[in-house]
Each structure stands twice: as C-alpha cells, then as structure tokens.
Image: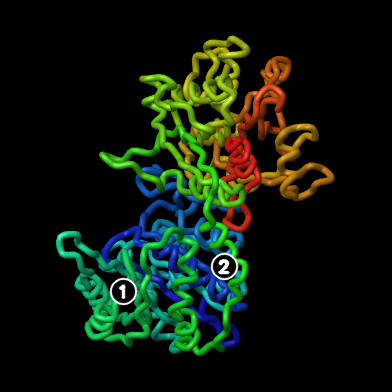
Amino acid sequence: MPQTKSQKVKYIFVSGGVISGIGKGITAASIGLLLQKAGYTIAPIKFENYLNVDAGTINPLEHGDPFLCEDGTEADMDIGTYEKFLGTNMSADSFVTMGKIYQTVIERERRFEYNGEDVEAIPHITDEIISRIYGVAQKKKADIVIIELGGTAGEYQNVFYYEASRIMTLKNPGDVIHIHVSYVPTPHHLGEPKTKPVQLSVRTLNSMGIQPDLLVARSEQYLDKRRRDRFAVFCNMHPEDIISAPDMGSVYEVPLILHKQGIDKRIFQKLGLKVKEPNLTSWNKLVEKIKKEKKKTIEIAIVGKYFTTGDYKLRDSYAALFDAIDHASWEAGVAVKTVWVNAEEVEKEGVKVIGHPDGIIVPIGWGERGAEGMITAASYAREEKIPYLGLCYGMQLAVVAFARDVLKWKDANTAENSTKTKHSVIHIIPAQKENLKRRAYGGTMRLGGWKQKVQKGTRAYDIYKKYKSFEDEKNGVVSERHRHRYEFNQDFEKDFLKNGLVIGSKSVVENLVEEIELPEDTHPFYIGVQGHPEYKSRPEAPHPLFVEFLKVSAK
C-alpha cells in the first residue's frame, strides 16, 4: 500500500536503546499529545517483537498487563498509554506483533498471492510492516503517524522494523524522522552520568543505516551542557537535537518537559510543517491537580496473584488498575497508598496479611492458584464493612464468597476451578465450552466493549448518573470492556436475590449478569463488575466507579 502524494502524511519512528522499559511509549505518547494539541491528527502504532499474534495469551508476569481495547484487541501496555494521553480509543490497527506479520505473509503465500516468488524476509516482511504503517495513516486520516518500535536497538528480533524505517526514510525524503530514546545511567559509585551506553546505542542505529534526527536522553536528573555536547560530537547531532528526559513525579509531566525544550518545534522544522504552539491549558490543569497537596491519605489493599517475579515485585502486571486508581485519586482529592497483598499468602495465613485497609480491590485473575485467598478477601470486606471493588475475577469470587457465607453452600465455586461442586455459581457459557474443547484460547474470550443496562435504584446506577457516564441515560445503558470466559450462573439467580445480593445490571444482548452489589444500608460500598473499568479510565476522565470507591474509602 504505497503512500500517494496527495496524502502528505508525515512519519515519526521512535526507537529505544540500552534497556527495555525506558519510556519509549511515554515519549511517543507525549510527542503525540504535543502535536495533537497543536491541531494535527495523530495516529500511533506500536510494533512488538514477539511471535504471539496478540498479547492475550501472555502471562502478565512476562510482559505486563495486556491492555484491552474497545474493539477487543488485547495489546501492549503502551496502547493504553496512547489512549490516556491522546484521549482517543486505540484499535487493532494500532498494535502489530511480529507474529501477526509472519502470519499474514505466510497466509498470503499459501493463497499464491506472491505469484510463485521466493518469499523472503526482505522485501516481503518489511513490505508488510510498511503496508501496515501506510494503512493506519489512511484509515485514521492522519497528518502524522507515530511508530513505536518494540524492544531495543541491536536485538535480532526487531531488525526488520528498523529496516522498514530505513526504507521508508529513503523513499519519503523529508517526510520521515527517527527519534531515539536511550538511557543515561548514573552509577552510584561514580556519581556522574555516563554517556557511552547511548553512544553505542546510536552507533548500532548507524550500522543499520539510520541516523537519528532527535535523541531523547532518559536519566535521573536533567542533562548538563557537558553531556549534551558529548552526545552532539559522538552521535553526529546538533546540541539542540538532544532532549533531556529526567525522572518526574508523574509521567503526565513529560509532555510539558519535552515542550519546554522545544521538541515539538524541532519536529515541525524537520518535517517541513508549519510550527504551531500546542494548547496545553487543560494538560497544565491536570498536572496542577496531580501535584496539589492532598489532605488525606488512604490505604487500599490489592489482593492479587501476579505481583511476584523471582525475588522482585512487579507493578506492570496490574498497570491499568494502578493508573485507574491514580486518576481517581486526583479527582477525589486524596492520596492513595496501595498495599500489594499476595492472595496465596492470604490462603496460608488468613486475613491478618490484609490488615485493616480503608478499601480492598480484588482484580483480574485466572485459575485456581490464589483463588481461595481472593475469596477470603471478598468475605473479609463484606463482613467487616470495608469498601470492596471486585474486577472481573474479583466479581466472580465475591459471588462465590456470598454463596458460601450467606447461602451456606460450602462447596460453591467457579467452574473454572472445580468441576465437582453442585453449586457452580460461576460457569462457562456454551460458546466458550466449544472454544476450550478446540484449545482455541487466543482472541476467543468475551472481549472489548459490551453494552449493559443498569437498574434504577442500584448503587451502580446512582454512580453512573452522578458522574454523567451513561451512554444512554434514558435507558440506563453504559458500555464496559470485557476479557473473560466465565459468567454468573443465572440458574442460581433467585437464591442470591432472595438472600440480599443485588444484581445491578445485565448485558443488553445476552442478558448476562454484569454487576453485583450489596445495598447501601447494609454495606458502605460493595460492588463487583464483570467488565474492566480500569481499561476505560483516563487522567482527564477517571472512571466513576473508582472515584466513588475512593471517596467512600476516605470516609
């Protein structure tokens, strides 16, 4: 899909060097925000190295929490970053893996679409990469496409992405620039930033025929003139093209830091675009709200099962959840201290591991490991009147806890974890049974945005109304994103209703249970949702369920 002259689309490649997780996604999103606020239509796209077709089958401990898009795409966390900075929904076009590239090329070869050619990495793999870049430009009617390359320069897995960048730069002179984000370490025993790792990273780019137009240097502190001058000399760049990106209190300050150094102006100049001043009024207000001193600090316990990797604890396994808590805390005007509680430890040692937090969240999860600890947490929150928010698995296990404690069905469980129980209060719907029989795990769950009708008189209805979050208030319709196979078993619905559990909403299409709660006169806040409100939360539009949960917890 070649670019036509009438398109006049500009392309910005963003690559990384030295270490992964350095902040390419934050940098790409920040640049996108600045250009968007200057009036340009931006289309980001992330290319990942792995051979998985999407991120849905990856253990969150391996690559972080997959981000769930409105169209059901299970993507990399950076896609969530783009949504939060740009305020627009991403889709399947915004996320491509090497597995998807290979799959497309091989399927095309099987259909004889290459007319008997030898199908090779170059040009066929690189052509497919470039085609997807041009495709997202056309579909989104973009002025500027920002292409984030996964991994770091020098890895064998992503060499074809860099080759595609080189080819596009050659074929579209003046319309393509390359921004390299690299890490400047400051070893404690030396006490000064060391530039050699970045120099070697840029040299690796040069060896692939790419000269970066801008260098974003990530470091603990601002770069001094000496370091900028060394980068300019050894990386063959102008000093004004070296941008410092120090550690900040919040990632949402990064666009302001980059703008202050003129990165957007340099991009406009290099791409031959009219220099425009971005309107950052609302973003400045957001940062002011983030930095404003909070008068009260509350403690929220997250009882989950994906915190530990080796001897270390990993925040990225619940990245969207922690972001949603942050967004809501700024709106609620409280500081939040999150306590990470391993559900397996709750199984072994009981609720003393949880302590006495102001609120409890049980998040997404899969399978039997740690499930009993999460059920214990749901019971503990209900019995002790601690505000509780159950997300997907956390909603399902709250139902199990209620069945065991209130209905006295001691064998109650989810069919995901037990096939022997007579009370499968959470079960699998027939369509999903067929998927599991065929071992069709990838992309076959109930995914993406699903509309649900919220019942008047429920806590959920009042919250959505309070924060003006209905898509259709007259009919009480909202949409939440889903990522699960198992559902509330409606064979037992009457038993639950008779004993005080409230079913707050059901899906518009299949009439499946979407939300459960306890009445406000029996519990200050006890809500479980089958969907994932954390994936819809944005810094300038926090999700109302999280905001209200924190406000009640603060009381």
Percent across and percent down for residue 220 are 31, 64
Mark 1 element type = loop
- Number of marks in the image? 2
Q: Residues within 10 Å of mark 1 (few under 14, many from 20)?
A: some
Residue 307 position by quadrant = top left
Seen at 59% across and 40% down, the residue is 550
Placement of 210 over or under 302, stated as above or below? below
Q: Residue at x 31, y 66 (%)?
A: 219
Q: Nearer the viewer, residue 440 or 110?
A: 440
Residue 170 vs 453, above or below: the answer is below
Q: Position of residue 527 (x, y in %)?
A: 63, 32
Tag 2 secondary structure: helix
Left or right of 182 in this view: 454: right
Residue 289 falls left or right of residue 239: right
Q: Residue furthest left?
A: 189
230 sits to left or right of 533:
left
The residue that mark 1 highlights is 223
Q: State the quadrant of the C terminus.
A: top right
Q: Is residue 440 visible?
A: yes
Residue type of the residue flagged with mark 2: Asn
Residue designated by label 2: 284
Front residue of 330 and 156: 330
Percent across and percent down for residue 84 are 55, 59
- In the image, taking residue 131 as reference, residue 545 lies left or right, namely right
Q: Which labelled disc corresponds to residue 38?
A: none
Residue 41 seen in this snapshot: no
Q: Which circle's residue, 1 or 2, is located before the other in the chain?
A: 1
